[in-house]
Amino acid sequence: MEHKYQKQVYEQFFGYSLKIVFRYIYRYERAVDIVNDGFVNMFRSFDRYIPGPEKDAEKMFMGYIKRIMVNAAIDELRRKKMSPEIGGIPDHVWDLSSRTQDADQMIIYKDLIKLIKGLPPQYRVVFNMYVIDGYNHLEIADIMKIPVGTSKSNLSRAREILKKNIKKIEDIIACNM
Amino acid sequence: MQYVNHDMDEMFRKAAENFQLKDGKDWDKVSASLHKPGPTPSPKSKGTGRYPILIIIAMLTLTSALTLMLIREQSGSAVTADTIQNKYQSVPARNVLEHIAQNISAPGSNISKQHRLNIALRLKKSRSLKHEINSSIKNKLDSATEIQITKENNKDQVQKSQNLAERITKDNLGEANPVTGSFKNQDNKVQKEKIKNASEDQIQSPITSIPTRSTINKKGLYAGLFAGPQVNQVEGQGFNKVGLSIGLMAGYSFNKKLSIEGGLFYSQKHYYSDGKYFEMKKGSMPSGMKVINLEGSTNILEIPVKLKYDFLQKSKGSFFITAGLSSYILARENNLYFASINGVDQDINAIYAQRKTYLAGGLNVSAGYNIKLQKKSGIRIEPYVQIPFKGTGIGSMRVMTTGINFGITRDFHR
């Protein structure tokens, strides 16, 4: 891929990639580094990418980027031995200004993403991969090098924790009303 | 704002699609990385101690194998039947009786023909006995240690018999007449019987006095230095990181099979647990806190006391089993909790530095193999399991430990 097109691709798909990686990686700054590394690796091995028919080109390319970013995020979590991180997410990383969405809705989305990020890393990865990124348990087990049963049980535990936390938030909101 | 009770997954998918983050683009950085040769270097983790531990294990195994090879080269090949035979033949071939007989049967001596015949018969007997000694030694090639002991004892025996026979000769036969060659008391029948019996005893004793393995002294003190990896789990929930155990051990052997040992070990245990196995004691945690799960490590001083039983003992080594109790002094505990406090889930890290003692806190069982290096030193390989009787730490969790110890031991007994 020529240099000028690389920059265009980077600028166009950076936000999309960062949103994917930020669901896996706790720290914003580390997520940015992983996205940049992901783009470097993708551009270096771009000759391996086989584009599909023109009408599906963008969709297929986004799927290709998603796979690269998810693998990069999982590699980072494996390097850190899936150890949980502490400390909150600073408010300045969020962009709550949106022309298309209600401000309250943006806050809800932010809170829901924070709930996902608050999961233990093993549960967080499985939940993101299965529920949001569309991997099945066989694919998750193959990528994570875990049994299929573990993938299913991690998903189940993640859902339990998220349900509890959503209930608590609803109760808090109901009390405040 | 209303939370609709709909499909939770769909809610999170929508949130993932629509949430926004601040812009963090840095094309210059990416461009610079692209122009560097080779792939982007990925940060390497510092490791958790697993690889250094594996290197230590590999080095210990290699060192012990090399030491064994060296010792075999130096000592093993020299010990052959011929060598032993020659060594025994280097002891003066003429035994005492032969010496006496030659002196007595010197021309011109007044000793009677019967007496000379008796001596000759005894000489023949002693020669056949010596042949029996040599062939029995050939058949009894056991260990270099036993043969060495046997050789030394026989030398002593020969010397003793020589001394004793000389004494008897002097006492009973009296001084030899330098002119006639006869002995003062040579006609004393009782004295002759004494000489005959004493000398035969001395000849016979080398055969019976070859020490067997059971007569070698195995009582006494020994000590060792040990180290090895270990893994821990709480209530069968699976292992976390690999920890390390290192320490000293001392023991006393009552006999060649039974010993008692005590030790002092420092170990680092890593574990993971669901919150349901973590006991929330009053005052130990903030109010309103509920532990969902945790990951932690403890630094522990362990004091095991156990009985050891050796079996299948060969010259190169022996198998053993041990069983006993371990007491613990918990020095430091570091836990990372994923907990809910007043309805908000969060990660909390906590370090506890208060020491706590657990007397007879667990059962300690092991089975292993001793490799004999030299007479008094050896290498021990000992896989073990520690089963807790009670919970330890701030959450009173029952942590089961499995590991393997590698050690160098030294005997201090005679």
Image (cartoon, rainbow, N blue to C red):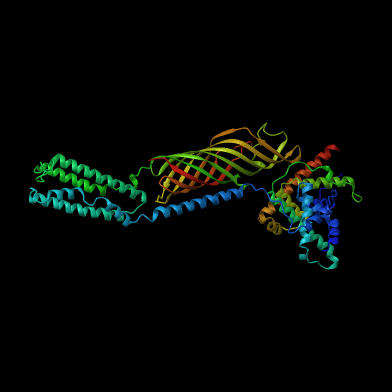
Q: Taking A29 as reference, is B271 left or right?
A: left
Of residues B26 and A71, the one nearer the viewer is: B26
Q: Identify the image quadrant of residue B220.
A: top left
Can you name the residue that lies furthest to the front here?
B179
Of residues B41 and A51, the one nearer the viewer is: B41
Q: Position of residue B215 (x, y in %)?
A: 33, 44
Q: Is residue B3 visible?
A: no
Of residues A123 and B159, the one nearer the viewer is: B159
Q: Give the number of callouts.
A: 0
Q: Position of residue A59 (x, y in %)?
A: 83, 62
Q: Position of residue B34 (x, y in %)?
A: 79, 58
The N terminus of chain B lies in quadrant? top right
The C terminus of chain B lies in quadrant? top left
Can you name the residue that lies furthest to the right here?
A99
Can you name the residue that lies furthest to the top here?
B283
Q: Taking B321 as reference, is B83 left or right?
A: left
Q: Is residue B269 visible?
A: yes
Q: In the figure, B302 relative to B4: above or below?
A: above
Q: Position of residue B345 (x, y in %)?
A: 75, 41
Residue shown at 47%/39% (left/top)? B250
Residue shown at 83%/63% (left/top)? A2
